[in-house]
Image: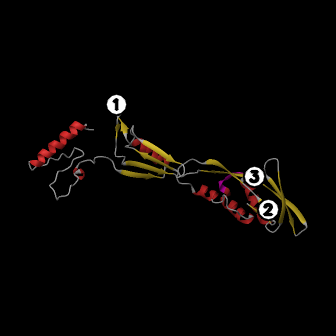
């Protein structure tokens, strides 16, 4: 980067050329300009250079791997990376302001070379999260479990399907009470046709194995199950 003395000399040199009716242009130089008479428009000469003065781009990524590879390729000592958990984003300014290592003076930069990574949730996780804080009846919850059983690692698939069949078999019964067992599961007692008594036992949690964000490795995620009896019906 030219210091102030060199830059001032360049200005004076170009002004002298302009006063003589000629303007020099170097295709390999940066930050060139033209001095024009009053009433004329000042035009940048950057587009005629072999290379632009600086990189101006705003790349956006949905792959953490691609984002990391891009930052590695264009790494600079002045690079700044920030993150937002609310937006699930990482924001990088590759040509951020720097500091002179000798005197500590801040060397401003354009901050025009940027890269943004936005983490996107996978369809699997979005499906499970859509059920959170959404009251469901036992039939609707059973249909959801039947559809998403492939994601579940605990309870086993056979136990999940047994739950689904129990929900179907008890859709017309009247649930009366529930008892928490030692292992955390719950046992629900019901009455059918005001005579037959029975019960079903349901787990207190379901563990799903799935990647949270696209491009990430799968991990185990625990979803807690909450039940309540409402007017004889079982709600989730």
Q: Going 74% across and 59% down the picture, which residue do you hit?
A: 161
Q: Going 37% across and 46% down the picture, which residue do you hit?
A: 111
* Rendered location of residue 147, percent (x, y): 66, 61
Q: How is the image coloured?
A: secondary structure
Q: Quadrant of the C terminus?
A: bottom right
Q: Is residue 178 left or right of residue 63?
A: right
**In the rendered structure, does residue 152 fall within the stretch colored magenta?**
yes
* Rendered location of residue 58, percent (x, y): 39, 52
**What residue sits right under mark 3 in the picture?**
204
Q: Which residues are magenta?
A: 150-154
If you read the primary sequence from the N terminus, does the residue marked by circle 2 or circle 3 appear first?
A: 3
Q: Going 65% across and 49% down the picture, which residue do you hit?
A: 221
Between tags 2 and 3, which lies in front? 2
Question: Which quadrant would residue 233 be assigned to in this image?
Answer: bottom right
**What residue sits right under mark 1 in the picture?**
103
**In the rendered structure, does residue 159 fall within the stretch colored magenta?**
no
Question: Which quadrant would residue 79 be assigned to in this image?
Answer: top left
* Rendered location of residue 129, percent (x, y): 63, 57
Q: Quadrant of the N terminus?
A: top left
**What residue sits right under mark 2 in the picture?**
229
């Amino acid at each position: 980067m030219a210091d102030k003395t060199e830059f001032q000399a360049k200005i004076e040199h170009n002004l002298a050329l302009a006063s003589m009716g000629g303007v020099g242009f170097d295709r390999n130089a940066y930050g060139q300009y033209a001095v024009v008479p009053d009433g004329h428009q000042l035009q940048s000469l950057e587009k005629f250079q072999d290379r632009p003065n600086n990189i101006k781009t705003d790349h956006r990524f949905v792959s953490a791997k691609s984002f990391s590879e891009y930052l590695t390729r264009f790494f600079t000592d002045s690079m700044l990376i920030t993150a937002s958990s609310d937006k699930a984003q990482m924001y990088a300014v590759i040509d951020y302001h720097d500091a002179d290592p000798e005197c500590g003076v801040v060397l401003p930069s354009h901050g025009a070379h940027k890269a943004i990574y936005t983490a996107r949730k996978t369809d699997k996780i979005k499906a499970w999260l859509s059920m959170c804080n959404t009251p469901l009846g036992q039939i609707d919850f059973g249909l959801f479990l039947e559809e998403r059983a492939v994601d579940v690692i605990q309870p086993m698939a056979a136990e999940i399907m047994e739950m689904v069949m129990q929900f179907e078999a008890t859709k017309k019964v009247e649930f009366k009470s529930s008892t928490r067992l030692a292992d955390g599961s719950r046992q629900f007692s019901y009455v059918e046709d005001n005579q037959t008594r029975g019960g079903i036992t349901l787990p207190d949690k379901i563990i799903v194995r799935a990647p949270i964000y696209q491009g990430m490795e799968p991990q185990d995620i625990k979803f807690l199950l909450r039940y309540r009896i409402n007017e004889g019906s079982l709600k989730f």
